[in-house]
Image (spheres, rainbow, N blue to C red):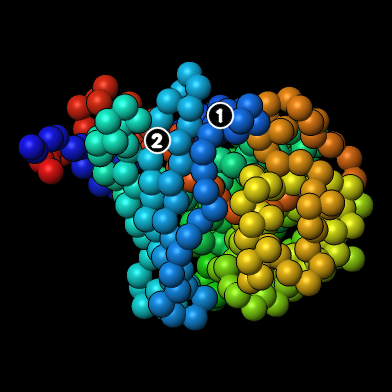
Amino acid sequence: MAFDVLWLSQADIDTLGITMLEIMDEVERGFVAQGRGDIEMPAKIGIHTRKDCFNHSMPCYVGGELDMAGVKVVSGYPPNQKKGLPYITGIWCLLDPETGLVRAVMDAAWITAWRTGAASGVYARHFGSPDTKSVAIIGLGVQGRMNLRAMIEVFPHISEVRMFDPIAGQSARYQTDMQPLLPGAAFVECANPKDCVANSDVIITCSPIVEKPQRYVRAEWLKADCLAIAVDYDSAFDAETMSKAVSFTTDNAGQYLWTQEHGVYFQNGYPDKAGLHSDLGEICAGTKAGVRTGRRTAVLMGIALDDVMTGHLIYQKALERKIGTWVQL
């Protein structure tokens, strides 16, 4: 028996005009559900067809009053950038929790880009200093842009954005794209990571995730009071940055520890279970409190929970606006 499925392309999603603040609020609702024990979310499973490349499957069910489910099939191929192809590609499927039927299929690159920035924003809401004025971004691609969008929503007094990317021309393109969102801020191109992070209130690393990281951002370069957010696993910050911070947080403790135990990421000095201050479920549900002073650090892996919350928001707005193409399966 055939049934209708809503197809939403990246262009379709763009027309909906969803804001970073809306996604941050939805992602935070998801973290509250996580903190209450209302989600089922196995760790990412995947295959790796080339060096430093991944193809992941990411399912999640959010129970309780939310009652929504979905699964993402996503690929990350750093070599694509030199080929003029996107680093992240994939699709996300909205599932009916009652019947298991697919209700919608949509572009996953859009979801991944926006929900990843949104998770950083949620973390910054609970750990950031209200007086934050300077943000350093390492890696000026899609995530460099999305994470700055999220910081703008949290910190109203940003006056300086420090930029570093090893690819020539990235800083100029980044400033052209992002300056309109912060017209009064100075955008400073830095020659190296050390100059980029020095004296910054918030440091966010958005480099490609690799199996053998260089960890080129050193704890000794950071000032005593700062927020250090890794959206690139353990590729950029050295172990001391995370292990000797006043707090170390991740989006989902179970997934972080599972990934660490399987012996590829978060090795050689990154915090283990004893070194975890919290995950964002505990923080957003209120069972633990954020810290506002000292070096506060986070590894935000990007989890299927965020995809479900963002994808469901897209689906609801698409139905309201009658956007997308209905197809039969």
Report the Cα–Cα distance between label 2 and label 1: 12 Å
Residue receiving disc 2 = 69
Near-viewer residue (306 or 143): 306
Residue 169: percent from left, percent from top: 52, 71
Near-viewer residue (208 or 277): 277
The amino acid on which the numbered mark 1 sits, given as a three-letter code, is: Asp
> Does residue 184 appear in this view?
no
Mark 2 Cα-neighbour bin, 10 Å: few <14, some 14–19, many ≥20: many
Q: Give the image quarter of residue 277.
A: top right
**Horizontally, is 262 left or right of 132 in the view?**
left
Tag shown at residue 323: none
**In this view, which residue lies farthest toward the left?**
1
Dot placed on the residue nearer the N-terminal end, 2 or 1: 1
Residue 69: percent from left, percent from top: 40, 35
Identify which residue is drawn at 42% across, 56% down. 57
Q: Are marks 2 and 1 in contact (CB under 8 Å)?
A: no
**Horizontally, is 102 left or right of 129 in the view?**
left
Image quadrant where one finds the C terminus: top left
Residue 243: percent from left, percent from top: 85, 59
Residue 197: percent from left, percent from top: 77, 61
Identify which residue is drawn at 73% across, 50% down. 298
Above or below, 150 against 274 in this view is above
**Horizontally, is 306 left or right of 234 in the view?**
left
**SS of the residue under disc 2:** strand
> Does residue 36 appear in this view?
yes
Identify which residue is drawn at 38% across, 40% down. 70
Residue receiving disc 1 = 38
The amino acid on which the numbered mark 2 sits, given as a three-letter code, is: Ala
**SS of the residue under disc 1:** loop
Q: Give the image quarter of residue 311.
A: top left
